[in-house]
Image (cartoon, rainbow, N blue to C red):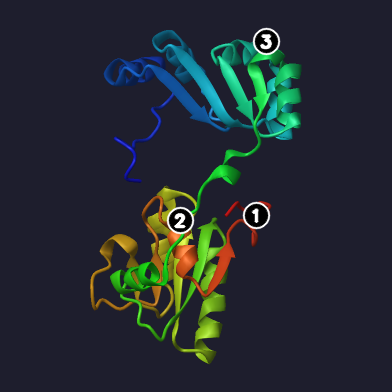
Amino acid sequence: MTDADNIFFVPLDFKYVVRKYFNTLRPRVFVLAESELWPNLLREANRQTKGVLLINGRISSRSFKRYSRFKFIAKKILKNIDIFLVQTEKDKENLERIGVNSGVVEVVRNLKSEINLPILTEEDLLKLKSDLSIPAANRVIVAGSTRKGEEKELIEAYSRAKSVEENLLLILAPRHLERFDEVERICQDFPFKVMRRTQVSPNKQWDILILDTIGELAHFYALSDVSFVGGSLVPWGGQNL
């Protein structure tokens, strides 16, 4: 993510911790995405910035039921947001039913559909394969945004496929960063050479690669021969590309 000045975790939602973050960063505008509606974070953002904006906002049916039970508290929290840019008419309706003024809510669709995906040339793909030590003859399976419970099944399927076609490689991209160690331990239960993306160097061979970086998955989908999108082997409902 080369366009970002800094990348860090959202602070724990304790008043003194959040205030310290804002006192240090001193942002002019605060933009949050989807449904990260933390009370102290929003209160401090409203207090210390010139505007608070929610982009790609969504209020699921489950969240709506929860907010509806505590409508007074939810309305008080949401008052800290100046503009809501939401994904669907249903999200807009849910916010209005909670008590948000319709004049500050606008439906702009899912912003992920506006992303300009990178267009990689054949030369770009060859360079990426070279950087990853992928031999030209090998075929690549990329499993992106995988969730807990999926990796073991994917590796078992990969093992069966590899017994038929030996030159297969598997790249696993866990949905959540904190699962990298867990996924690596799962991989080590199988007789394959396992490596992380950040450990790859020329001439280091691997069978399974764990993508432990942010912002590269689209490139990896582009070089794959077969792609799998996570959240579909467990009761989650699938994941966006």
View extreme (left): residue: 202
Residue placed at 39% from the left, 50% from the top? 214
Label 1 or label 3, whichever comes before in sequence order: 3
Percent x, y of residue 146? 53, 58
Q: In the structure shown, which secondary structural element does the residue marked by tag 1 occupy?
A: loop
- Label 3: few (<14), some (14–19) or many (≥20) C-alpha neighbours in 10 Å: few
Residue behind mark 1: 238
Answer left or right for 208 relative to 239: left
Q: Is residue 169 above or below residue 54?
A: below
Which of the 4 image quadrants contains residue 114?
top right
| Camera-side mark, 1 or 2 | 2
Amino acid at the residue labelled 1: Gly
Answer left or right for 122 relative to 235: left
Residue behind mark 3: 72
Q: Is residue 36 above or below residue 116?
A: above
Residue 231 is at least partly visible in this image: yes
Percent x, y of residue 86? 64, 29
Residue placed at 59% from the left, 11% from the top? 79
Which disc is residue 81 wearing?
none
Answer left or right for 52 relative to 232: left
